[in-house]
Amino acid sequence: MISSSSEDLEPMQDQLQQEVDVINEWSKQNQMVLNASKTKVLLVTGKRLEIDGKEIDQANSYKLLGFT
């Protein structure tokens, strides 16, 4: 889970996108694939995040199930 909080939304969103990009690159280097269609983002704003140019779906709630 990635989280961030700020009163200035644009830099916060840019920071979150950079963190998603870092995780995506780490995953590729470790021969794992992030699936943008199975990934959700819960934002209290309007800007969308992406993985490899594919927009991550926005959710209004989530259930943290973990990963293996």
Image (cartoon, rainbow, N blue to C red):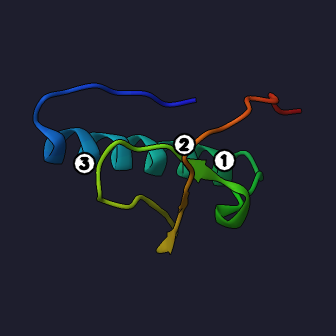
Mark 1, secondary structure of its residue: helix
The location of residue 66, given as percent across then percent down, is 80, 28
Amino acid type, mark 3: Asp
Q: Earlier in the sequence, mark 1 or mark 3?
A: 3
Residue tagged by mark 2?
A: 23
Q: Quadrant of the C terminus?
A: top right
Amino acid type, mark 2: Ile
Residue 32, compared with residue 6, is above or below; it is below
Q: Nearer the viewer, mark 2 or mark 3?
A: 3
Real-space Cα distance between discs 2 and 1? 6 Å
**Mark number for residue 27?**
1
Q: Tell me, yes or no, whether the two marked residues, 2 and 1, touch with CB atoms within 8 Å.
A: yes
Residue 36, compared with residue 13, is above or below; it is below
Residue 9 quadrant: top left
| 32 and 40: which is toward the camera | 40
Q: Residue at x 28, y 40 (%)?
A: 15
